[in-house]
Image (cartoon, helix red, strand yellow):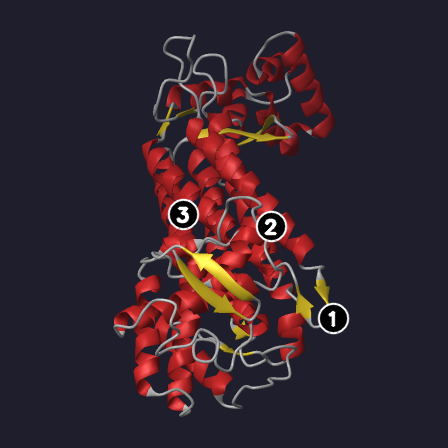
Amino acid sequence: MRIEKDSMGEMELPDAALFGASTQRAVLNFPISGHGMPEGFLSGLARVKLACARANEELGRLDAGKAGLIATAAEEIIAGQNMDQFPVDVFQTGSGTSSNMNMNEVLANRCSQLAGKPVGSKEPVHPNDDCNLGQSSNDIVPTTLHVSVAVALRDQLKPALQELETSLQAKADAFAEVVKIGRTHLMDATPLTLGQEFSGYAAQLRKGVARVDRAVEALMELAIGGTAVGTGINCHPEFAGKVCRLLSEQTGLAFREADNHFEAQGGRDDSVEVAGLLATIAASLTKVANDIRLLGSGPRSGIGELALPATQPGSSIMPGKVNPVMSEMLVQASLYAQGMATIVQGCGRDGHFELNVTIPLIAKSLHDAITVLANGASTFSRRCVEGLEVNKETCDQLVKRSLMLVTALNPYIGYDNAAKVAKRAFAENKTLREVVLEEGLMKEADLEKALDPMSMVQPG
């Protein structure tokens, strides 16, 4: 064990710990959930610290040696190293000060190691004076929130949605000539092709990708430069612009300084907007997953138009049973993401005066939602959609049995007569063709043409 000091006094720490007294106090103060901050957020915070160090170096406020050490330590964390050194619980100070200081202490102590100095010596790099130079938790943590979530949206969620969209579009093309009965209100409707149905699913995913792009754009303004309350106290006037430029160079995203720092720190409306877009994406994925599992229901006593891939035994008691587990997984993942979005909406209300005090929970919720949606969509694409097959015979039989083909007879016999035909056919268990001919409502040749299902899926 070793002893470190902070502004509140001494604190005992394990020798192997790279964090310091401030972090250890937070660990003792917040034994709440056992859930630390998301790795994506921590990587983003290290990325922001790296940019701050280089910006301070450019401004002549931090010498090149210190800036280089901080950069090296930050790059290690960005690469996924030393993640076990961030033990602070998500449910902590609402500004994220504990996580900010956790990062400052880890960076400073790693710099001590790199420079051959004792851990905890604060030499040659000080956690506050150097790692936090020109910064406050109140602008750094909101900045990290935007940077880390934007990167996760672009690198995790967008590729997963694109992958699923590609799989769905491939099935839309493959099923283009398969005519099936449509359904509205869960009841029989007029025909369409299975390809047309799947084209709708693919379009939902394309719109989902566009929503991800809009979510990323909503996060491009950064709070950096506002420091404590948005006034920029102790911050060089050129600092924020340089940090935004460096972050843009690192990530390839067009980050910019917030137009109004008081809004950027007091409100979290941008996060609420992103949460709403994620909830919409989750709703789309749920629609697709539910339709596919319903179309594959059976195999003999359900709809059975699709044959879903068999991925695992479906029952511990019913031999041979196979369930639509991938659809069930994606529905649950989507429900979870929508729950996280609801949390963010509630958090967005808690901006009291110059600071929102729920930022760690916002970060956890958004990163969790992105992760489960991305993994869910990608897995669903590979383990379900790519292996889908059509039961064409079932599709044909259901089309022939449907009474809603009568809709195509409206121009020939009128709505009222068509309704009577449908009701009599249902009551007497006859086909539409039989009833129309018995009633003498149409000539047989005209009737055959009017009841051709393929003509109904391509009107005009």
First-in-chain label (3 vs 2): 3
Q: Earlier in the sequence, mark 2 or mark 1?
A: 2
Q: Position of residue 169 (x, y in %)?
A: 38, 45
Q: Amino acid at mark 2?
A: Ala
- N-terminal of the pair, mark 3 or mark 1, is 3
Crowd rating for badge 1 (residues with CA inside 10 Å; few <14, some 14–19, many 20+): few
Counting the numbered discs, the total is 3
At a point 43% along the width and 47% down the height, the residue shown is: 374
Asked whether disc 3 touches disc 1, contact meaning CB atoms under 8 Å apart, the reply is no
Give the quarter of the figure containing the N terminus: bottom left
| Quarter holding residue 72 | bottom left
- Is residue 216 something that shows in the picture? no
Residue 289 is situated, as x and y percent measured from the top left of the image, at 49, 35
Q: Is residue 290 left or right of residue 171?
A: right
Q: Would you place residue 145 above or below residue 438 in this image?
A: below
The crowd level at tag 2 (other Cα within 10 Å; few <14, some 14-19, many 20+) is many
Q: Residue under circle 1? A: 353
Residue 341 numbered tag:
2
The residue labelled by disc 3 is 165
The answer to the question of whether label 3 and label 2 lie on touching residues, with beta carbons closer than 8 A, is no
**Element type at mark 1:** loop
Residue at figure coordinates x 44%, y 85% from the top left = 242
Residue under the point 60% across and 44% down: 339
Q: Are marks 2 and 1 in contact (CB under 8 Å)?
A: no
Q: Marks 3 and 1, Cα distance to the nearest angstrom?
A: 43 Å
Q: Residue flagged by tag 3: what amino acid is it?
A: Glu
Q: CA distance from mark 3 to mark 2?
A: 23 Å
* Amino acid type indicated by mark 1: Phe
Q: Nearer the viewer, mark 2 or mark 1?
A: 1
| Most foreground residue, 24 or 37 | 24
